[in-house]
Structure formats: C-alpha cells, structure tokens
Image (cartoon, rainbow, N blue to C red):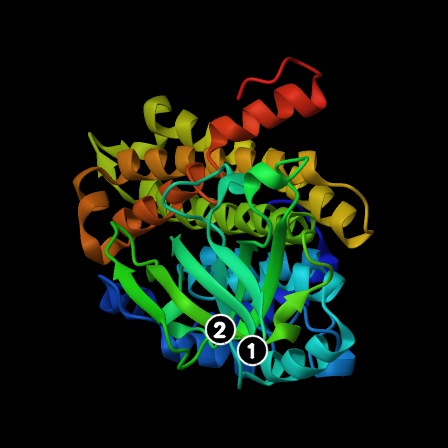
Amino acid sequence: MLTEKPEFDDLRSGVRQVCAAFDGAYWRGLEPDSYPEEFVTALTEAGYLGALVPEEFGGGGATLTEASIILEEISASGGNPSACHAQMYVMGTLLRHGSPAQKQRYLPGIADGSLRLQAFGVTEPGAGSETTRISTRAELVPEGWRINGQKIWTSRALYSDLMLLLARTTPYDECAKPTEGLSAFIFDMRDLPGLTINPIRTMINHNTTEVFFDDVVIPADALIGDEGRGFRYILDGMNAERILIASECLGDGRFLLERAVAYANEREVFGRPIGANQGVQFPLARAYASLRAADLVRFDAAARYDRGEKCAAEANMAKFLASEASWAAANASLDTHGGFGFAVEYDIERKFRETRLYQVAPINNNLVLAYLGQHVLGLPKSY
C-alpha cells in the first residue's frame, strides 16, 4: 500500500479476497486474447463491478475514489482490471447526463450483472486523440438514429451488451466550434443489423476491437441529453477514465515493486542479497517515491471529481504521473529479476507489457503535457 488511508482497508481487503481465487496461472492461461469471464462474474457478484451505480438502482453507491481503489487492488493482486474498467468510467456520462428513463432502463441490470456496459465507441482510425474530428455520423430518421462509420480500439465490444457512442449529428464544417455537433448515445448493441465487430490482436490481452456501422438504426431515445452536446458529456467519463487508469498503474507498480523487493532480498550473489547493491536498490527506491507521489495526486483528483469540481488538470496529471511511475517500477523489477523477469511463470513480463499501454492510452502522455502547458501554464497552443 502507498498512501495510508485506513478508512479504505475493508474495501481493499474485500477486493483482494475476490482476486485471491484468480492467481497468476489464471491470467497467464487467458493469453493471448481470452476474456476472463469467471473473474468478471465473481467481481460482479461481489458487488464491485456495479459499485458506482446508485443504491436506488441496486448498486453500491460508491464514490469514484472507492472505485479507483477497487481497480488498484485488482492490479496489485496481479490481475488485469482492463477486462471491466470501462463499466466504471463510462458510468460518469450516464449518471450525470442520462435521462431518468435511461437510468431506470439500464442501471439495475448493470448493478446485478444482467447487462454489461463495456464498449466506449469514441476513437476512429482518422481521429485518435483529436476527438472533434470523428466522422461517424448519426442521422435522425423516422425509425430513430441511423449510424454510419467506424470506431477502433473499442475494447470489449464483443463482451458488452451496451455501448456508449459518440457520433457527429452535425457535420464538422457546419459547426461554429469543433466541439459542437457531437452527440452521445447509449443503446443495446446485441444483434444489431449492420453492426460488425472485428477483434484486434495486440501485445497484451486487452480484448480490443474495431466496430463498423453500416446503416445501423438505434432508438430515438438512445440520445443522451441534448443533441450536439455529447462532447461535453463524455468529458465526465474521460476525467473519470484518467483517474481510474492512474489507479490501475499504481496497482501495477505495487505488484512489480513488491515482487522485486522480495526477489532482491532472497537472491544472493557473491555472498550477499542483490538488494544490498545500490544498482538494484536505488531504482526500486526511486520507483517507490514516484508511485507514492502519484498516489497523492490520484486521491486529490478523485476527491475533486467526487465533489463535482473541475478536475481535468488533476485527472491528467494523475494519469501521467502514475503511468510514468509504474513503467519505472516495471523496468526496475525486470532488471532486478534478470533473466527470470522474462520467464512467463514470474508474471513480471506480463505486467511489464500491460502497464506500458498507459503511457499511450487513453491519452498519450505528450498530449497531457501539451494540455498542462496550454491550459494550466498559459503557454501558446502547441497542437
């Protein structure tokens, strides 16, 4: 554990009890691309995957801070929370901007596990971090909304019942601002004519896909909030996403650091533990200090989110610092283990691959720096 917050000890302990049944052999057995169905079911039955659903809809009524701890503990146990984390960060858009009818329709099912909200359709081949340039189009027709376009890196779409989608309802060149004309939708994506999902193989088991919409029609009441304001709505989800991803990185860092420290104390070379050598000890100590600092920023960002305050800068910094710290821990852990770090059974190489993703996604760390430079420091726009 990093920051001492005893008020969350019971929550951490409960999550670890669920994770104890899913050891390293379980996660290794899923590679390269099998979905951890048993783990997701166990997490749901324990109430953790529906934690953010308000109690009135059958959920746990948890704060984002508590949700971040759930994901951190999954990572720290050696698991991979990417199998289900979208259900938490997508929740912000639905909870804050969904209609009462949408909440009543979907939230009870999400809470009890009969519905999964895992698919977040935003990124496109021609519009990665430049979200305002997406071209997937939703047009209002008598039957509802007709959607045409393509999404990519829509992880877990093959295992999700519902999708949160961002699409253009007004062409880009007809909008006064790039952020206008984008609308958010939530709908049941099962057995939809014209919807095609293709898996994408990657260096980690992330169950990611590309999704094609060919004259897909969804109900008119799938629209979240007002037409054309979807970009603002999904920002709530994106800030939550950055905070939750930061917590996963912190868990990864803890796992990698704890394994490295244990090995450095046990492994003897030239008559003494390798941890006595500063070349081994200092990188681990530096990684710990970085993880500790990132942890404090994570809690600050989550607290601001829970209070309904602006937290874009803090959420971005939390993701940036935690992803950098976890990668430093990964490298230090691999160096400490030497050749054994590359052995699959040690789980170091698996976590090494998993945690590397978060310097690139859900937003590249260079774009985080550009955001801070422009919006926090007041420097000229760089992109």
Image vertical order of residue 91 relative to residue 1, above or below: below
Amino acid marked by disc 2: Val
Disc on res. 217: 2
Q: Which residue is mark 1?
A: 143
Disc on res. 18: none
Real-space Cα distance between discs 1 and 2? 7 Å
Residue 26 placement (x, y as % from top left): 30, 70
| Of residues 232 and 228, the one drawn nearer to the viewer in this rendering | 228
Query: Closer to the N terminus: mark 1 or mark 2?
Result: 1
Residue 230 placement (x, y as % from top left): 65, 53
Identify the residue at horizontal 60%, vertical 18% (top origin): 381
- Pointer 1: residues within 10 angstroms few (<14), some, or many (20+)? few
Q: Are marks 1 and 2 in contact (CB under 8 Å)?
A: yes
- Identify the element where label 2 is drawn: strand
| Of residues 378 and 47, the one drawn nearer to the viewer in this rendering | 378
Identify the residue at horizontal 49%, vertical 52% (top origin): 122
Image vertical order of residue 224 relative to residue 48, above or below: above
| Of residues 304 and 145, the one drawn nearer to the viewer in this rendering | 145
